[in-house]
Image: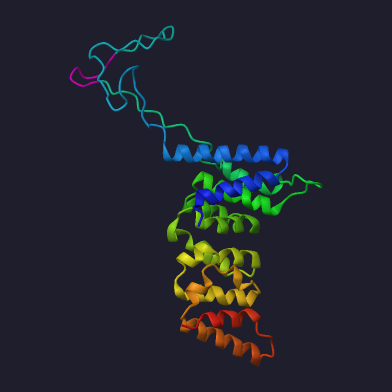
Amino acid sequence: MLTPDEWMAQLHTALRDRLGGAARAWLDEALAEAHAEATAHHHPKPTSRPDRIGQPDSTVHPEPTGHPEPTGYPAPTGQPAPTNTASPNRATPSPSPSPPPSLSYTAYALPVWEMRFVSAGRQCTRREPPHARDPEAAEAARILLLHTAGADARTVTRLYEHGTAAERRAVLVALPHLGLGPSARPLVEDALRTNDTRLVAAAVGPYAACHLDPHAWRHAVLKCLFTGVPVTAVAGLAERARGDRELARMLADYARERTAAHRPVPTDLQRVLALTAP
């Protein structure tokens, strides 16, 4: 089985081969920005700075008492030069350190790579004629950006909640490769409450197989039957369904309801029911 990094490397290679020249250049720039963001996040710049050259950041030396240190700027005309009014027994406090510069965003703007995440649908075009926009390539680019930036639970939640259906699907597909643990489970549960089959199919992937509890996972399988999503989209179906008597009961009840309403029973239902045998 491939590691997340190996899987992402293969995805990156396949995506660059699929994109046109301008789109490849856009992808390279976007991934470089995401990598810079991840590097700055894991290795932040120091929040303090030396007051004098050669002085360690963590050391603050008191100024000499009695005489102010020259500033290098003359006092305004007609005004006396400033004098040191500090107590002779107290050191002059050094100025507060300036806050570290922001990375690629401010308090009012998203990181640059997140804006690339949003614009991927417009930028990812195929190399072959007619050089049209490629939704599948855009999804792959978004997955690569999330992984390269090391997106945390807060970031993926924000992108999911404010994203389009295509952006939400990319977040769901990327979840197994981000190492977030169960913190992103609410996103999967939200997708399973929709009737968007593309979101439902993405929600029942490997992340759901690892992090949904048995009750939620059984309802996810039934959701696939309700909406017509092939059960082949359910990751780990055979392993989790084996010997699950409660799932077998739920499937039998659903089949009886469909039959009583003179509606066809999904063919996938019998397939899943057979998997529930011990």
**Which one is in front, 262 or 107?**
262
Q: Quadrant of residue 74?
A: top left
Q: x, y (%) of residue 67?
A: 26, 11
Q: Is residue 119 visible?
A: no
Q: Is residue 89 magenta?
A: yes
Q: Quadrant of residue 97?
A: top left
93 relative to 18, above or below: above
* 109 horizontally vs 262: left or right: left
Q: x, y (%) of residue 238?
A: 52, 74
- Residue at the (60%, 83%) spot, across then down: 270
**Main SS class of the magenta portion in the image:** loop
Looking at the image, the residue that sits furthest to the left is 89
Q: Is residue 103 visible?
A: yes
* 31 horizontally vs 121: left or right: left
The residue stretch that appears in magenta: 84-91
254 relative to 2, above or below: below
* 151 horizontally vs 138: left or right: left
Looking at the image, the residue that sits furthest to the bottom is 260
200 relative to 47, above or below: below
Q: x, y (%) of residue 165?
A: 64, 59
Q: x, y (%) of residue 124?
A: 70, 46
Looking at the image, the residue that sits furthest to the front is 1
Q: Quadrant of residue 166?
A: bottom right
67 relative to 162, above or below: above
- Residue at the (56%, 88%) spot, across then down: 253
Q: Is residue 176 magenta?
A: no
